[in-house]
């Protein structure tokens, strides 16, 4: 008999079909559906598939006596109560490494787009404005790229940055061994040095508003910010104020504090590009994430360690 799985995030029909080859599942992308299934099938649910922003709380965990595995579809797991799960002997795993390339590609699309003013140039061209009437945008290459969080995605960002002849600096809680890039001991010192600051940290309480008004002030009027991490890492009000006052030159954000509601504070600002938390989304990345979940869960129920445990 296949283990019973509770899915609490939105998945395409092909993804659900693939998971259904290995597991019986209850599909609950909405909170009311999740509550209903946990009430009616709580004693039988043995695994949960969720995402970091949705998470799975201690109370959720305690409501499922047969639970032995909680998986995040992507790399983030900030709202899964990992400590409580482990205290109950429940394994936690994620999809680390399955969408890193996609996220890094999207970050550079945002960064290139905002530095070179692509959206504004597109709109001007459609209105019949020729180049002689438009301000020149700065070069993208040969600048300083500061990466806030040099994990697997941060390393991909650094690799791409080298292709644009960017000098790389980074901040982590501690320096990474074997990394040649320049280390900075605080987000503010990194921002003071950088022309571009790309946020690639985990979410959660420890990184909330890590990028605040002081960091944005340090980035300066020629600096650009990109956030492809979690919306909570950047203070949205401080970002809006800095953009509006010209304290930074521009921003590209794929994530924001108000998700899934749009960041209306940023809507009237021409020097910001906004996408709806899509950096990690591509057919290739989704397939890889689903396959990683199937691998993690199949190994777990065979008595083996998952491929990517948390």
Image (cartoon, grey):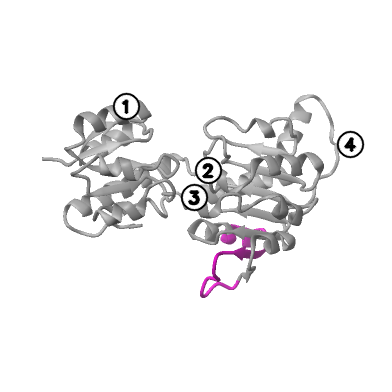
Separation of marks 2 and 1 at Cα, in angstroms: 27 Å
Residue 33's disc number = 1
The mark closer to the camera, 3 or 2, is 3
Measuring from the top left, give residue 229's x and y in whole percent: 54, 49
- 147 vs 27, left or right, is right
Instruction: Look at the picture and state if 277 lies above or below 310.
Output: above
Q: Earlier in the sequence, mark 4 or mark 3?
A: 4
Write down the quadrant of residue 263 in the picture. Answer: top right
Q: Earlier in the sequence, mark 3 or mark 1?
A: 1
Quarter holding the C terminus is bottom left
Q: Earlier in the sequence, mark 1 or mark 4?
A: 1
Tell me the residue that label 2 is attached to: 279
Q: Residue furthest right?
A: 132
Q: Is residue 252 visible?
A: yes
Q: Earlier in the sequence, mark 2 or mark 1?
A: 1
Say whether marks 3 and 2 touch (CB < 8 Å).
no
Q: Nearer the viewer, residue 13 or 194?
A: 194
Q: Is residue 163 magenta?
A: yes
Tell me the residue that label 4 is attached to: 132
Residue 204's disc number = 3
């Amino acid at each position: 008999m296949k283990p019973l799985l509770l899915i609490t995030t939105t998945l395409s029909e092909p993804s659900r079909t693939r998971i259904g080859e290995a597991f019986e599942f209850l599909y609950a992308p909405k909170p009311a559906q999740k509550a209903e299934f946990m009430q009616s099938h709580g004693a039988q649910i043995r695994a949960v598939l969720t995402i970091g922003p949705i998470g799975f709380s201690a109370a959720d965990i305690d409501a499922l006596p047969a639970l032995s595995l909680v998986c995040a579809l992507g790399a983030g797991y900030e709202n899964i109560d990992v400590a409580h799960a482990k205290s109950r002997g429940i394994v936690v795993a994620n999809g680390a490494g399955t969408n890193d390339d996609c996220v890094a590609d999207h970050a550079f699309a945002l960064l290139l787009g905002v530095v070179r003013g692509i959206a504004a140039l597109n709109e001007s061209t459609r209105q019949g404005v020729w180049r002689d009437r438009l301000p020149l945008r700065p070069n993208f290459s040969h600048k300083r790229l500061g990466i806030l969080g040099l994990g697997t995605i941060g390393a991909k960002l650094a690799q791409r940055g080298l292709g644009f002849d960017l000098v790389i600096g980074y901040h982590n809680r501690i320096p990474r061994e074997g990394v040649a890039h320049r280390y900075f001991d605080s987000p503010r010192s990194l921002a003071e040095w950088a022309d571009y600051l790309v946020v690639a940290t985990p979410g959660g309480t420890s990184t909330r508003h890590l990028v605040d008004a002081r960091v944005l002030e340090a980035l300066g009027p020629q600096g650009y910010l990109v956030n492809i991490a979690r919306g909570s890492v950047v203070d949205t009000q401080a970002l809006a104020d800095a953009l509006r006052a010209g304290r930074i030159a521009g921003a590209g954000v794929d994530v924001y504090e108000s998700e899934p509601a749009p960041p209306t504070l940023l809507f009237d600002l021409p020097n910001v590009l906004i996408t709806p938390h899509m950096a990690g989304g591509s057919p290739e990345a989704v397939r890889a994430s689903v396959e990683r979940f199937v691998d993690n869960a199949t190994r777990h129920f065979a008595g083996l360690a998952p491929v990517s445990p948390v």
